[in-house]
Image (spheres, rainbow, N blue to C red):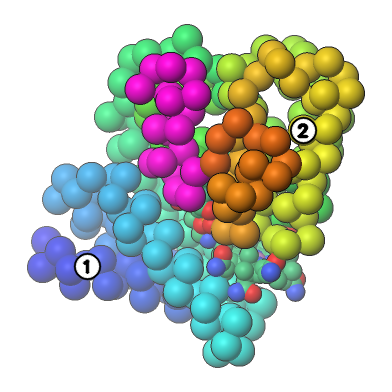
Amino acid sequence: MAEQAAVEQQLKEGLIKANGPSALEATQALLDAEVDPKYVLQEVMAVAMFELGEMWKRGEVFLPEVVASAEVFKNCNALVEPALIASAQAEVSTKVVIFTVKGDLHDLGKNMVAAMMRTAGFEVHDLGKDTPTEKAMNAVKEIGPDILGMSALLTTTVGQQGVVIKTLKKEGLRDKVKVMVGGAPVTQEWADEVGADGYAPSAPEAVNKAKELLGKS
Ligand code: B1M
């Protein structure tokens, strides 16, 4: 492999410019060189998407370009996930239900959290994006998860995390599950305000927080 920093840069640029072949080539090169797949996801791919978001805010890129980059992210993620899973620890007695809240189509970060939780040996049930509260309630009743994880990326949808927690209370389910919240606009203060049990700013930290909440750290 060429110098690692150069390949990381190639991957970041491939994501930002939606150059799929170049991004995939760089992802594969990093994995072949046995760079930690968690590092590739968190420190390279997620960082590139953050930079893209800043460019979008400044009006340097537009929605169709962001859509194209998100597609490249998904394809690169599909390469990284098997490497992540291969490093999974055999634990499994922890069940997680995870989803992106109603009205919100952002799922790249939620997918990363789900993948890293699987790596930690958790049994993860991913309900997807734009998830109606009722679907989440049914999953809690049917699956009986230890953790219910909610992702939200928009200031207009983050309130749904509070709606879900209120609905859990209304249905007598709140004490049966630990609730975790995350996503770019989410903070510890917000988690406290809506009555979540835990918040994590990143996918690896979400795994640590889940273990902490279950007394397994
Ligand atoms: Co959207 N978008 N987007 N977008 N998008 C943001 C979020 C935005 C900040 C961009 C900007 O203006 N700079 C902005 C929100 C502004 C706001 O609310 N204040 C925005 C907007 C405005 C919109 C639309 C409204 C645009 C429009 O249509 N006019 C629209 C909304 C559609 C909808 O949801 N209803 C929209 C659409 C889209 C795309 C479809 C094009 C695409 C999403 C594709 C997809 O996800 N499949 C997209 C993208 C890619 C982004 C940015 C550029 C990148 C998001 C991302 O994937 N980041 C984003 C800019 C930004 O966030 N700075 C932006 C990478 C990902 C790995 O990080 O999701 O933060 P993230 O996840 C992290 C942590 O947050 C954490 O761990 C992850 C990994 O470490 N985490 C958790 C996440 N979930 C967690 C759960 C946990 C714990 C941790 O516990 C359960």
Name the quarter where the N terminus is drawn. bottom left
Write the start and end of the magenta stretch as one range.
200-217
Q: Position of residue 73 (x, y in %)?
A: 48, 59
Q: Which residue is mark 2?
A: 165
Residue at 32% x, 67% y is 11
Q: Is residue 211 magenta?
A: yes
Q: Nearer the viewer, residue 216 or 6?
A: 216
Q: Position of residue 38 (x, y in %)?
A: 32, 45
Name the quarter where the C terminus is drawn. top left
In the image: residue 73, left or right of residue 125: left
As shown in the figure, which amino acid type bears the numbered disc 2?
Answer: Ile
Position of 18 relative to 174 (above/below):
below
Q: Which residue is mark 1?
A: 7
Disc 1 CB within 8 Å of nearest ligand 1 atom: no
Q: CA distance from mark 2 to mark 1?
A: 43 Å
Q: Quick one: label 2 or label 1, which is nearer the N terminus?
A: 1
**Mark whose residue sits in front, 2 or 1:** 2
Position of 141 relative to 184 (above/below):
above
- Mark linked to residue 51: none
Say few, some or many: other residues with alpha carbon within 10 Å of mark 2 (under 14 / 14 to 19 / 20 or more): many
Res. 110 in view: no
Q: Is residue 33 magenta?
A: no
Q: Position of residue 9 (x, y in %)?
A: 27, 72
In the image: residue 162, left or right of residue 191: right
As shown in the figure, which amino acid type bears the numbered disc 1?
Answer: Val
Q: Secondary structure at mark 1?
A: helix
Q: Secondary structure at mark 2?
A: helix
Classify the position of ligand 1 by quadrant: top left, top right, bottom left or bottom right.
bottom right
